[in-house]
Amino acid sequence: MATTRTDPKLALAANGAKKAKTYEGLTRDQLIQAYRYMFTSRRIDDREILLKRQQKIYFQMSGAGHEAIGVAAGLALKPGYDWFYPYYRDRALCLTLGAKPYEMFLQAVGAADNYDGRSVALVDLWNRGVLDVIVTNQRGPLLIYKNTVVPDNKWVDFELEGTASNRSALGAEVKLYWSGKQQVQTVSGGSGFCAENQRRLHFGLGKNPQIERAVVRWPSGKVETIEKPLPGQVNKVKEPA
């Protein structure tokens, strides 16, 4: 969230209305609304902790235990005069100032758009060795997210063509051995709803990889070994006769 001008959303009593009983300067309705913000803040925290455990969000800083002070700060700030910049453990404060739970969840998952998404495809559009993202939306625009990665990170791709197996090499498996590690990928003919990723297999290797070999297992049962394929290029492999 960007810099936010304070604008508390508590339901204040209308001017001229009958004076209600107050508790430390707050009416019954204001207290109920304050507790509602505190409860909502804790529920959002609980949900984000679950999403973090599921690896669906990359970061979560709980505001548990700070709800009351956050709401109190929101009530104390003067609308149109005081300013507040969101940082950590300030969820209840942001809710009091008008932020919505939906906006917080969009921020947590790194989404800037809230269209009705229908399909997603991963493909290296510019042959740069990174996977870009194409998203289609119902009654919305086609979105292309160009991926940007650290230049030092290396990669290697494999584009397979079957002969005895099917030409698209569907079902073929590539196991890559590098720097004492292993990665395995399989050529898939369907990878999502109303979309399909590129069939070329993409392996991200990080910095200074030492590629030992790649083992290709074709659907026909044939096994082929490629010794020390070079990183930073697309290796086109045709099934041996």
Image (cartoon, rainbow, N blue to C red):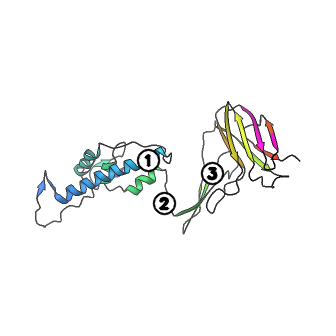
The amino acid type of the residue labelled 3 equals Asp
Local secondary structure at mark 3? strand
Start and end of the magenta stretch?
209-224
The amino acid type of the residue labelled 1 equals Leu
Location of mark 1 (residue):
50
Q: Position of residue 175 (x, y in %)?
A: 72, 40
The answer to whether the residue labelled 2 contacts the one labelled 1, judged by CB atoms less than 8 Å apart, is no
- Res. 167 image quadrant: bottom right
Count of residue discs: 3
Single out the residue that lies furthest toward the bottom.
139
Marks 2 and 1, the one that precedes in the sequence: 1
Q: Position of residue 140 (x, y in %)?
A: 54, 66
Q: Residue at x 25, y 44 (%)?
A: 69
Sort mark 3 into few (<14), some (14-19) or many (20+) by Cα contacts within 10 Å.
Answer: some
26 lies above or below 227: below
Instruction: Determine if residue 64 is in view.
Output: yes
Single out the residue that lies furthest toward the front.
221
Location of mark 2 (residue):
114
Question: Rounded to the nearest whole Å, what is the CA distance between mark 3 and mark 1?
Answer: 28 Å
Q: Position of residue 150 (x, y in %)?
A: 60, 39
The answer to whether the residue labelled 2 contacts the one labelled 3, judged by CB atoms less than 8 Å apart, is no
Sort mark 1 into few (<14), some (14-19) or many (20+) by Cα contacts within 10 Å.
Answer: some
Depth check: 125 or 138 in front? 138
> What numbered label is drawn on residue 132?
3
Q: Residue at x 46, y 45 (%)?
A: 52
